[in-house]
Image (cartoon, rainbow, N blue to C red):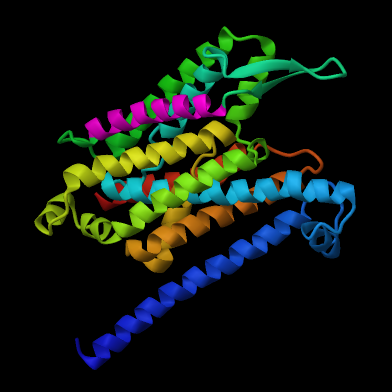
Amino acid sequence: MTAAGSGSYRQYIRRKWAVLILLCLLTAVFSIMSLLSGSANMTFSDVIASIFGRGTRQMNTIIWNVRMPRIAAAMAVGAALSMCGCIMQNVLRNPLASSSTLGVSQGASFGAAAAIVCLGAGTQINSGNGASALTITQPYMVSLAAFCGGMLTTILMLGLSRLRDATPSVMVLAGVALSSMFTGGTTLIQYFADDVMVATIVYWTFGNLGRAGWSEIGLIGILSFAAFLFFIINSWNYNAIESGHDTAKSLGVNTGLLVPLSLVICALITSVSVAFTGCISFIGLIASHIMRRFVGNDYRFLLPCSALMGAVLLLAADIACRMIVSPIVLPIGALTSFMGAPLFLYLILRQRRSR
């Protein structure tokens, strides 16, 4: 490589590192904003004091039992869904692919709802004032059932991707069909459930970051970090797949193993996220496409940048959900759908123009 070429490459890498560092700063900024947001009026000094255990009992409870878990859940789930969208778009050769557009989230939701109602993973409890609620007593059973539902969708999509005429548009239509099928299955489960379980499942499917506790967030975080390590180790293989599966095979990439294994890992972390926070649509689609504009298709940088952008977007969406009609907290899944639908339509129209 010439001196000029070496300098150009170093500048190319520095720009990507600059984007990565900026995303880290944005994540920190939105985390602080999230700590300050909510119906309880707390100043920055109150938040700092509570973080170090020097605030009032009420403030410490709000920070450590309400706001901190929401921030951690937003970061873990946003990163998980964004990585899934990034990898699915690569291995399926489909820019419209994500866990929500291909029905993986809906399949996971069906599995989780079946575990809650049919397998007894949820129990109705009565509070002291006579009100009823549903608590998930077996979260790992819910996670396993969600994984089975998401995995079933993944297997169907993987089989479809092997068909000769399975264009990206066909796969999206198939994802819509699978989403409708699993949504119908979830509706049937709700039909035979009692009123409390129906209300809880409906509320759960909206998406709610406040539902996950520290143990659930830890599980999502550990699985997402393990998935990230696998993806980043194979980043050069994903770079090769960007040029097509045949080209990747000629470069020594075992696509017959890497593609299904990547989809299984995506199904796992999506399903666990859905099991504990409900359906949060389009984050994987939005974050990965934004980052492609800034860092290109080099998966050494696209993966971590997409994960951080997903965390930033979900933190921003959660702040908006808590502030728009405060003290009411809007369902975050509805807001992310409003964010993602225009981008989804734009990508479809751009694909039609490129034909």
Badge count: 0
Residue in the picture at 60% in, 10% down = 193
Point out residue 164 in the picture as x, y percentages from the top left corner: 15, 36
Residue 322 position in % (x across, y down): 74, 45
Residue 180 image position (x, y, % from top left): 43, 23
Q: Is residue 302 above or below residue 94?
A: below
Q: Residue at x 44, y 22 (%)?
A: 182
Give the residue at the far left of this rendering: 250
Q: Is residue 329 above or below residue 34?
A: above
- Left or right of 195 in this view: 189: left
Residue toward you, 221 or 43: 221
Question: Is 159 covered by the magenta stretch?
Answer: yes
| Front-most of residues 294 and 52 | 52
Q: In the rendered structure, which segment of residues is drawn in magenta?
A: 139-160
Dividing the picture into quadrants, the one containing residue 237 is bottom left
Is the stretch drawn in magenta largely helix, strand or loop?
helix
The picture quadrant where one finds residue 153 is: top left
